Amino acid sequence: MTGNATNVEQPIRVKLVTAAKRHGMPTVAVVVATPLDLCLERQGPRPDNRRVPEDVVRSQHQAMVHSHQRLAAEGFNTVVFADTLDRLEPFLGRLSQAREADLGRDGNDGLGDLWLARRFFGPEILPLWQWRPASDLGTGRDRVAEIRLGQQSFTPALRDDGEGEGGCGFGFGFGFGFGFGVVLPCPLDPECSGQAWAPIHSVTDLHKALTGAMENDPDIVCTIHGDGDQEAEDRYRGWDDDPEGRADIQAQHANGVRA
């Protein structure tokens, strides 16, 4: 099969058919019936040394139109039009093979513990990624990593979204119990000694966290202060624990109703 030429000239096709038969191979002609106006349009962005003259494009297109009726007589076993080919199945097949290779299911090592990093942040991040098992940033089952390029680095962590030791305290929204997080300044107390974690879902979040654009993220959860909603809830519960304060509120409400 050749894919670097138009093959609209019969003498060229004869050589291809002869070579295939010499090797005992079947011959299949794939007709790419691209509309003439699209063929001409594609020449526009090309540089001068790659652009095909308009008269040549028109001649090649006309030759394609008139040749497909003669292909069987020239010795091709099968003649098909490109737009009738089943392309989805082989496309998905290639993606599946690539995924199985990443998971190490094809007999190779695969990506190993870098698979999740690639899934979240893309393949471009992998050469910069190193796990840091000695880091004291995470707790429990957290796994801390470092992304470094030159003198600049960033430290995300793979966190467990569960209860108890290692629980990160915020939901990742994926339907499973883990995800990546990053430590940011506590939004409730600039002098807080705890860790304020924010979930990161993509390379976009990595960039936002590195540049300070996530410091007011509504999903930040501090190990001391919780989040903003939790603090408000704690204050509400504090009123419930204060019978005199609650009684005073109820009395004011009753007086307001009577008035």
Image (spheres, grey):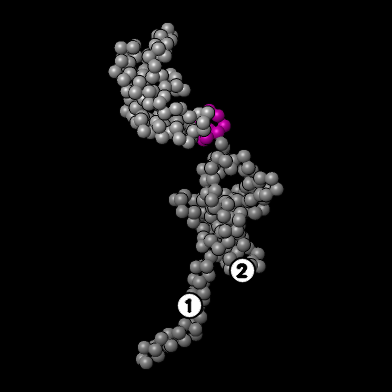
Q: Main secondary structure of the magenta part?
A: loop
Highlighted magenta segment, given as a residue range: 101-110
Tell me residue 226's x, y (percent): 55, 65
Judge whether 209 appears above or below 103 on screen.
below
Sooner in the amino-acid sequence: mark 2 or mark 1? 2
Q: Quadrant of the N terminus?
A: top left
Residue 102, magenta (yes or no): yes
Distance (Cα) linking label 2 and label 1:
25 Å
Residue to which mark 1 is pinned: 240
Residue to which mark 2 is pinned: 189
Residue type pointed to by label 2: Asp
Q: Which disc is residue 191 wearing? A: none
Judge whether 52 appears above or below 78 on screen.
below
Q: Mark 2: few, some, or many residues within 10 Å (few <14, many ≥20)? A: few
Q: Quadrant of residue 209?
A: bottom right
Q: Nearer the viewer, residue 67 or 85?
A: 67
Tell me residue 167's x, y (percent): 55, 55
Q: Nearer the viewer, residue 102 or 14?
A: 14
Q: Nearer the viewer, residue 1 or 129?
A: 1
Per the image, label 1 sits on a secondary structure element best described as helix
Q: Image point 46% across, 50% down: which residue?
A: 174
Residue type pointed to by label 1: Asp
Q: Image point 29% across, 18% down: which residue?
A: 69
Q: Quadrant of the C terminus?
A: bottom left
Farthest residue in the left direction?
69
Q: Image point 30% across, 12% down: which residue?
A: 73
Per the image, label 2 sits on a secondary structure element best described as loop
Tell me residue 239's x, y (percent): 49, 78
Residue 200, magenta (yes or no): no
